[in-house]
Amino acid sequence: MKSIFLLLAVIGVSLGAVIEMPLTKIMSLREKLIRQGKWQEYSKHKKAARASGSQTINDYEDLTYVSTITLGTPAQTFTVTLDTGSANLWVVDSSCNSPGCNSAVASYTRNKYQASASSTYSNDGRSWSIQYGIGTFSGTLAVDKFCVAGICYNTQIFGRATAVDESFQTQPCDGTFGLAWPALAVDAVQPPFQNIMSSLDAPIFTFWFDKKGPVNGGVGGLVTYGALDTKNCQINTLKYAPLTAQTYWMFGTTGVSAGSFSSNSMLRAIADTATALIIGPGGQINSIGSAVGGTYNSTYNLWLIPCSGANTLPPVTFTINTPAPTAFPIPASQYVIDVGLGNGQCGLAFYSIDSTGFGPAWVLGDPWIRTYCNVFDVGNKRVGFAVANH
Ligand SMILES: *[C@@H]1O[C@H](CO)[C@@H](O)[C@H](O)[C@H]1NC(C)=O
């Protein structure tokens, strides 16, 4: 008897799963508009539209890494942004017909959810709405079968987007797969990862972003559901920060430094896979920009720097409670970004927003995740950082 139980226990473990999904990098809206010379026009329009209210941080200016999921029976495939800064799943619906519903990207045809084509669809009855910096995305809630790389959950609640912001037409994707905590979810909908995690080996997922991934095609990174990524991450360097809240993936920092600048401000930080930049309080961003020799350019609302700085500038180092204060440098090769200005001019991946919606804080986006694999450990309520291989 005992050996049968042991055998079953072993089988039980091996019945779990680890799934790997390649990520594709798409160009952030800001970068796209700067490259097309349309940023000024857009930001003017946006400032006017944003006369009041604080800016939401998971902004579609910064939507950058996408992967695929399926909904329905038979499966309908969607390309979605993987976003640890929000907690809802939504896709554009077939009934959506405002300009933003369709893709203006020549190489991309938008996939839209068709409830009538799915035998497992049912109506939830509620409406949903998410406010981002650029506008509102809204529609109704539906229930259907959700799968990611063959791991499925039969009754996932998600948003059918019937009204989306016009700027979404420049994005070659169909929706968002929110990976933050349930407390952040609009309409208290249980996020997909919470529903599939019991099917996985471990209740974790690991992000690896390639150094400077190819844009629109090729593998730009990897998300591993259910395990660490031992191939792309230096696991011997892995350190975990306990979460200070279970809303965003939030943890504590005790300071930041760059060259001769050093601050001991204890600020909260979040790890956000869907933000292309590192966002922080204006005073700190300005100090970092000056310390590395950048010039603030009000036209682009961006610190500019010669592209050659990628090889010469000092790192920007965050000190994070893991739980002892530990230094995590970000090299210039990751924070000097080419936004298409030409003439050897690049941008610094640091952007100031004083009101993030949760007080003065850091939003550690793509440059952070390119430098360190991020391990989102739902089971142990912590987030881990390990040096990324490139
Ligand atoms: C910002 O940079 C661009 C490109 O170098 C330049 O044409 C523009 O005049 C700059 N704006 C300001 C306010 O310095």
Image: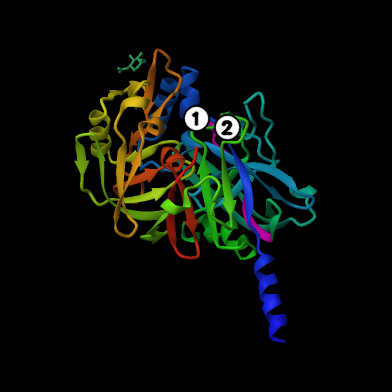
List x then y, in percent, for residue 143.
Answer: 68, 57
Q: Mark 1 = which residue? A: 29
| Residue 121 is inside the magenta segment | no
List x then y, in percent, for residue 77.
Answer: 71, 44
- Residue 351 lies in what quarter of the image? top left
- Residue 155 lies left or right of residue 389; in this view the side is right
- Residue 113 lies left or right of residue 363; in this view the side is right
Q: Quadrant of ligand 1?
A: top left
Relative to 212, does residue 21 appear above or below in the rendering?
below
List x then y, in percent, for residue 81.
Answer: 56, 42
- Residue 13 lies in what quarter of the image? bottom right
List x then y, in percent, for residue 91.
Answer: 63, 44
Q: Secondary structure at mark 2?
A: loop
Q: For residue 114, which numbered disc appears in the image? A: none
Question: Relative to the observer, which residue lies in front, 380 or 91?
Answer: 380
| Callout 1–callout 2 Cβ contact below 8 Å | yes
How far apart are labels 1 and 2 at the CA level?
7 Å
The N terminus sits in image quarter: bottom right
Q: Which amino acid does the dot numbered 2 rest on?
A: Gln
Whichever of labels 1 and 2 marks the residue nearer the N terminus, that label is 1
Asked whether residue 160 appears in the rendered view, the answer is no
Q: Mark 2 = which residue? A: 171
Magenta highlight range: 154-169
Q: Which amino acid does the dot numbered 1 rest on?
A: Leu
